[in-house]
Structure formats: structure tokens, C-alpha cells
Image (cartoon, rainbow, N blue to C red):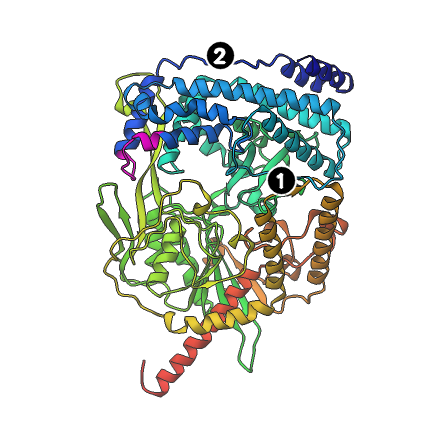
């Protein structure tokens, strides 16, 4: 303790006033926390949560000793996901709960284990912070050895004793320090940033109320059943609807806290974050600034505080420092400036483009349509025949595309995270006569077949569906149905997201005689299956033609979430496939593989995928400054060469017409987009899964020179569609000559 006080004095002498406040927090921190008593309603909340999960969750698993053991592990990992705080002796001490948590929770409603374990957790948090503070004052931060650090210790062994824990804490501190140094901060700035981070963590975790701890605890139990189930405390439930509405103001992103980082879970179509083209799911926000003010470090800050900082008045500026998802180098940050906006419905509705491609081989020019569908939406307040919906909007666009004589259509679902199940069924009906679209299975095994009952078809021509790892839920049902019927060629990443479950939110007060708010439980109640009987859960939809993509190797999608429910099958529904594409799939794949093997964009993507795989397999990061600088220089050189190659390309040889729903009602087409609008711009970037990015450092060099905004996946989907049109045309010509139709 004397050593720590000496370090505290040294830091106090060099740190400004705000950092001195952080030092004060650490100086007053306790290292022997006493467990608090549970809240007055906690006993009832525990019993109800345990009972509902056991009886009403889709899995129908009894809350027994096996679940109890997993419950304990989940809670420990929820508090200490990087396994750097709890010692093996702590885990051994708490192992008695493996045999008793089911009885304590379900029968007695005793949540005292949550507070006992949390008190020990706080002890370790404070011990780490004090140790780090001492190192900041006394350590010489030189990075010239071959030392390495594993920033992802989710599967690692916990430290066996305090000595081993301190060795881990020291290595982590050196990793944090080097990241800040590579971000070109001075030693004083680095000290201040890291000190504030640890002080904030101590302050935030020490101030957590019992209901917040209970929420972590019972959500850990729910996560044993599946990762989409969770307990919401009273305050969380009260803010639930408000937060959903407020999400429409700001940057348009759904955020969560993962391993101390505020993480982008999904982007609202048409929102500032999505429009910027610089942010994608699983990116981490490490700093936030209001307008031109200084950045504030938000690592380990409570999620609601980060959200408050990101939200703000309409048309004001918020600046974010983003740590990209597909990097293990925590110094590889980029700054993104966004203007807060209200996300309007028209920003998130279906849109279309017509590509007018030049004549080839003596043939006339050809038009193909692309419909960008960001979600499956519907106006729930208006259920009349012509109410606003995905299906009615897409039908209008299809009618316009048909009038303009497109030879084929691409449905772009790459950023479609789902939405209304009813709309997924109705939209499928625009492309098939009638029949089953999706099967839904209840916990008791009851299977319901949801069908399209309208024999009318809005479009019967060549069809390609473009997907990504971010296409989820309702978009998977739509793509899977048209794949089962053989109605469309599905093209894209190695699979879609793989979320094939349905959740419900039940307020616990419904099951208790009390006026006190007990919070709510969100839990899984159903599972989706395709008409063919295959679940969309976990595996998602496997495209007919898989394109090279870094996403194919990234840890995104349901399969990357611990505890995700399994994939399985049920008997297929009775339906009549149309098999419009199956005769041509082998030839379509062959042609696509030949093209992507030589295409410079896909060559680049393969190179980036190989680099990402190498980093992913290594799992550790070098703490050698020279090595890290060389790695950065190599990446910047690659980006510069990529940018040079893109800029040297000729202007596009095709015309593009943009169609909104308003324009779809008007005769003719608007003027084609100017060539400059086909080049890189914030409003015209493709979804993150398809963007070939140029580093921010390179982009700053000559901002006035636009760079071609390449979208390799859409380009190849268009070529596949042209191949399909060509093959169908040949088949039709042969049929005509032989008298077949």
C-alpha cells in the first residue's frame, strides 16, 4: 500500500485537475467489499424468472444441476469476460454453487450468490486498478522485445494466483499503452487516458445498484438457454420503449457493451452511421466528441452513458473514434464525423436502380433492375388493403422495372436485418404462385405452416438474391423460400446471419400479485424452418454461389455467439418447386468462379481475407513498437496502391437510373446519375460487407479527387444475372425451334 501511495503522489504531481479526480477515486477505493443484501423484490423476481425459463422457453430444459453449473460459469464470464480478474481460487471457492444454484434460485429465490461473487469481483477490479496506477508511475514503457499479448482471452485459463494475475495486468497495460502511443499521444496524455479509464471502471462498477447486478445475474441464467433471452430490470424496462424511439434520433445504430467496448450491433437503414459507409456491425466505439470539443475515452464506460453522449439535438455533430471489427490491432482506429438526424421512413424504405448496360456481341443494350431492401417493414396502425408495407412498395418498384423493360432483377438484402414475418411471407408471394413459405415450431412441437395464398405473381423473370452475413431473420426466410422453390439464384457471403428464433417480452408482474414493477423477461418461444424443413437457425441460408469476402472468415453471425441454439430439421411442407434456376447452377458457378479468380477486386478481397485469417489464427498482438509500425506502413502502402489502381480505372461504361417510390409513379426515367455520383461518396457507398475500403490516412491526402466506389459483390451479382438471362434465352430459343414452350 505504501508503494501505491508513493505512485499516487508521483502521478498527482504531473496530472491535471481532472486526472487528479481520477486519482482521488483510486485512492479511496476499497479492496475488501462486503456483499450487499438483495432488494425486497429480488426473491420473487428470481423465482419467476427461473420458472418462466424452465416452463415457457422453447428449449424446454429443466433448471437442474447441469443448468446451475452453466449458470455460474456464465455469470463469472459476464463479469470477467477476458478471464483476467477472478483467480482460480475464487472459482474453486464459488464452485459450491454448481450444485445448489438451481435450488437457491428456483425454490428459495435467493440471489445472495450474485452479490457475494460481485463483491469479490469488485475487489479484483480495484486491485488491478491500483496495480496499474503503480506501474504507470514507475514502469519504463519501452517496446523493443518480442513480447506478445492475447487481447481475446475468452477461452483462456484464469490466473492461478495473484502473481500470475498481475503479470497479465502488466502485459495488458503495456498493450493499452502501446496502442495509445501508436495513436501519436504524448506520455502525459497516455497516462491521463489510461488512468481515467481504470478510475472510471472502478467508479462505475462500485456504483452499480443491486437491481443492475441482479439483471446481469439473471441474464446469465437466461443466456444458458440461448443468447437472445435476457432479464430486464425495472429501470431497463421503463426505458425500453423510450430507447427504441430515441434510436430514431442520433446516428441510427443499435449499441451493446461487449468486453468493455461499446459495440455496434446493427445500423438503422438510412441513418447517419449507415449512410457514412464507414461504420459496420461489430465495430467498437472507443472515443466520442461533441462537435469540435475534445474526445472522451469511453472504453469501460457504462453503456447508457455512452448512448447519452452519442445522442443529441438534431443536426448537431458527433465525432466517433472507431476500432474496426475485422482487426486485432487496437491502434488501428479511424475518426468518423456524423451529423445527428431523425431517421425518416423514406430513408429506410425500398429503392431501386436500373443499370443500362452497353451492347455486346452485336446485341442491343440491356437493362437490369436492382431493388435495395433494407428491412421488412409495415405500418401497423393501418391495416387497409393499400397500407404502407414492404410488399406494396416492392410491387410498385417491380411494376416500374417491368414497364422499363428490365431483363432481370436483383434483390439486394445485404443490409437487411429482418423485420415483419408477415411481410417476408407476402413478399415471397410476389414471385411464386402460391404455397408454403415458412414453418414455425412451438415449444410443444406444434408446427404451423405459413403460406402465400395469392396465386397472382408480380414478377416471373430472372431473379438473383444478394445476401451477406448481416442478412438476418425475415430476410433469411424470404431468401430461403425462393431458394427452396428454385425461383432465384442466391448469391453472397458464405452464409446469412443465422437467426432463426422468435422472442417475446413478458412483464413479470403478469405472473405476480404486486404493484411493484418486477421488470421483464425476454425469451425465445419459437423457431423458424424453411418449406424444405431445414432450420434457418445457426447455419442461415447457404448461397447457391458463394463469393469471396472477408466476412466469410469474420466472427459475425449466430454461429459466433456462445450458447446459440442448434440447427435441426423438421419434415418438409408440401410444395411444388418451379426449378427455374437449378438446371443452370453448375454453369453459373463455373462462369462466376472463372471471373472472380481474375477480377482485380476479388483478388484484393482474397488478399485481405488471407491477411485477416493469419491475424485471426495468431490471436496475439505484437508489443514490439517497430514491428507494429512496419505492419501499419505495409497496410498503408497496400491501401495507397489500391487507391491508385482504383483512380486509374476508366469511368463506368453503363448508365444508372435511381428510382424512389415517388419516381416510380411518374412516367419515364429520371436523368441518369452523373459519373461523379457513381464515384465514392458518403451517400452512395455499398453495404459494409461489400465495400473495399481505403484507409482514412490515404483519403485525407487528396479529398478533392474521387475514388471509384467499387461494389464487387453487386457487380458480380449483375454478371451472374446476365448469365442467367443468357442461358434462359438460349433455352427459350431451343424450345421455340423444337415446338416446345
Residue 34 numbered tag: 2
Q: Position of residue 405 (x, y in %)?
A: 46, 70
In front: 506, or 46? 46
Question: Left or right: where does residue 561 sit relative to residue 149?
Answer: left
Could you tell me which residue is drawn at 41 percent across and 76 percent down? 728
Q: Nearer the viewer, mark 2 or mark 1?
A: 2
Question: Is residue 61 rendered magenta in the image?
Answer: yes
Q: Quadrant of the N terminus?
A: top right
Q: Choose the circle earlier in sequence order: 2 or 1.
A: 2
The residue stretch that appears in magenta? 56-68
Could you tell me which residue is drawn at 43 percent across and 23 percent down? 94
Q: Secondary structure at mark 1?
A: strand
Q: Position of residue 599 (x, y in %)?
A: 60, 67
Could you tell me which residue is drawn at 54 percent across and 75 percent down? 365
* The quadrant where residue 724 appears: bottom left
- Please say if 649 is above or below 223: below
Amino acid at each position: 500500500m505504501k508503494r501505491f501511495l508513493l505512485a499516487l503522489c508521483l502521478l498527482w504531481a504531473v496530472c491535471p485537475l481532472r486526472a487528479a479526480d481520477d486519482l482521488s477515486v483510486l485512492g479511496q477505493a476499497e479492496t475488501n467489499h462486503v456483499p450487499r443484501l438483495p432488494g425486497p423484490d429480488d426473491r420473487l423476481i428470481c423465482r419467476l424468472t427461473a420458472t418462466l425459463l424452465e416452463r415457457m422457453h422453447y428449449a424446454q430444459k429443466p433448471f437442474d444441476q447441469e443448468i446451475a453449473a452453466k449458470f455460474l460459469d456464465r455469470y463469472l464470464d459476464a463479469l470477467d469476460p477476458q478471464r483476467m480478474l477472478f483467480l482460480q481460487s475464487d472459482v474453486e471457492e464459488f464452485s459450491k454453487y454448481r450444485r445448489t444454484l438451481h435450488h437457491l434460485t428456483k425454490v428459495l429465490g435467493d440471489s445472495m450468490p450474485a452479490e457475494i461473487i460481485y463483491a469479490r469481483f469488485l475487489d479484483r477490479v480495484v486491485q488491478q486498478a491500483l496495480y496499474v496506477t503503480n506501474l504507470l508511475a514507475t514502469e519504463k514503457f519501452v517496446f523493443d522485445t518480442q513480447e506478445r499479448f492475447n487481447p481475446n482471452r475468452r477461452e483462456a485459463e484464469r490466473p492461478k494466483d495473484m502473481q500470475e494475475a498481475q503479470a497479465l495486468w502488466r502485459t495488458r497495460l503495456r498493450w493499452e499503452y502501446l496502442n495509445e502511443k501508436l495513436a501519436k499521444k504524448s506520455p502525459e496524455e497516455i497516462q491521463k487516458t489510461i488512468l481515467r479509464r481504470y478510475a472510471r471502471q472502478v467508479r462505475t462498477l462500485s456504483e452499480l445498484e443491486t437491481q443492475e447486478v441482479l439483471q446481469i445475474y439473471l441474464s446469465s441464467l437466461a443466456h444458458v438457454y440461448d443468447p437472445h433471452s435476457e432479464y430486464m430490470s425495472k429501470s431497463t424496462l421503463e426505458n425500453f420503449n423510450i430507447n427504441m424511439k430515441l434510436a430514431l434520433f442520433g446516428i441510427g445504430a443499435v449499441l451493446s457493451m461487449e468486453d468493455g467496448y461499446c459495440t455496434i450491433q446493427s445500423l438503422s437503414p438510412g441513418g447517419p452511421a449507415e449512410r457514412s459507409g464507414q461504420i459496420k456491425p461489430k465495430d467498437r466505439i472507443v472515443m466520442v466528441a461533441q462537435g469540435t470539443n475534445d474526445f472522451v475515452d469511453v472504453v469501460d464506460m457504462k453503456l447508457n452513458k455512452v448512448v447519452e453522449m452519442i445522442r443529441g439535438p438534431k443536426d448537431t455533430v458527433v465525432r466517433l473514434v472507431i476500432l474496426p471489427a475485422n482487426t486485432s490491432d487496437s491502434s488501428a482506429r479511424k475518426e468518423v464525423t456524423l451529423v445527428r438526424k431523425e431517421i425518416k421512413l423514406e430513408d429506410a424504405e425500398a429503392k431501386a436502380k436500373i443499370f443500362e448496360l452497353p451492347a455486346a456481341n452485336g446485341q442491343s443494350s440491356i437493362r437490369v433492375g436492382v431493388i435495395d431492401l433494407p428491412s421488412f417493414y409495415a405500418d401497423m396502425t393501418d391495416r387497409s388493403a393499400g397500407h404502407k408495407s414492404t410488399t406494396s412498395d416492392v410491387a410498385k418498384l417491380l411494376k416500374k422495372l417491368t414497364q422499363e423493360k428490365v431483363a432481370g432483377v436483383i434483390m439486394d438484402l445485404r443490409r437487411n436485418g429482418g423485420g415483419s414475418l408477415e411481410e417476408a411471407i407476402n413478399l415471397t408471394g410476389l414471385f411464386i404462385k402460391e404455397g408454403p413459405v415458412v414453418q414455425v415450431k412451438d415449444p410443444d412441437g406444434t408446427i404451423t405452416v405459413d403460406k402465400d395464398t395469392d396465386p397472382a405473381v408480380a414478377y416471373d423473370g430472372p431473379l438473383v438474391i444478394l445476401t451477406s452475413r448481416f442478412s438476418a431473420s425475415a430476410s433469411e426466410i424470404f431468401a430461403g423460400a425462393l431458394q427452396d422453390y428454385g425461383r432465384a439464384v442466391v448469391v453472397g457471403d458464405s452464409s446469412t446471419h443465422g437467426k432463426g428464433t422468435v422472442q417475446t417480452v413478458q412483464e413479470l408482474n403478469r405472473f405476480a400479485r404486486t404493484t411493484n414493477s418486477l421488470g421483464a423477461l425476454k425469451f425465445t418461444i419459437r423457431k423458424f424452418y424453411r418449406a424444405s424443413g431445414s432450420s434457418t437457425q445457426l447455419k442461415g441460408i447457404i448461397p447457391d454461389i458463394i463469393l469471396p469476402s472477408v466476412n466469410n472468415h469474420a466472427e459475425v453471425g449466430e454461429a459466433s455467439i456462445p450458447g446459440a441454439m442448434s440447427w435441426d430439421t423438421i419434415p418438409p411442407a408440401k410444395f411444388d418447386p418451379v426449378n427455374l434456376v437449378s438446371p443452370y447452377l453448375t454453369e453459373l458457378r463455373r462462369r462466376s468462379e472463372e471471373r472472380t479468380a481474375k477480377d482485380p477486386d476479388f483478388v484484393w478481397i482474397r488478399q485481405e481475407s488471407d491477411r485477416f485469417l493469419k491475424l485471426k489464427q495468431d490471436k496475439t498482438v505484437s508489443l514490439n513498437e517497430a514491428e507494429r509500425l512496419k505492419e501499419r506502413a505495409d497496410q498503408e502502402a497496400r491501401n495507397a496502391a489500391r487507391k491508385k489502381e482504383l483512380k486509374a480505372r476508366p469511368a463506368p461504361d453503363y448508365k444508372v437510373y435511381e428510382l424512389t417510390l415517388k419516381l416510380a409513379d411518374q412516367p419515364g426515367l429520371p436523368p441518369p446519375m452523373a459519373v461523379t455520383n457513381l464515384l465514392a461518396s458518403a451517400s452512395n457507398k455499398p453495404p459494409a460487407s461489400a465495400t473495399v475500403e481505403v484507409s482514412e490516412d490515404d483519403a485525407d491526402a487528396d479529398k478533392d479527387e474521387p475514388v471509384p466506389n467499387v461494389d464487387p459483390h453487386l457487380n458480380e451479382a449483375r454478371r451472374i444475372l446476365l448469365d442467367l438471362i443468357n442461358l434462359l434465352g438460349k433455352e427459350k430459343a431451343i424450345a421455340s425451334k423444337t415446338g416446345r414452350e
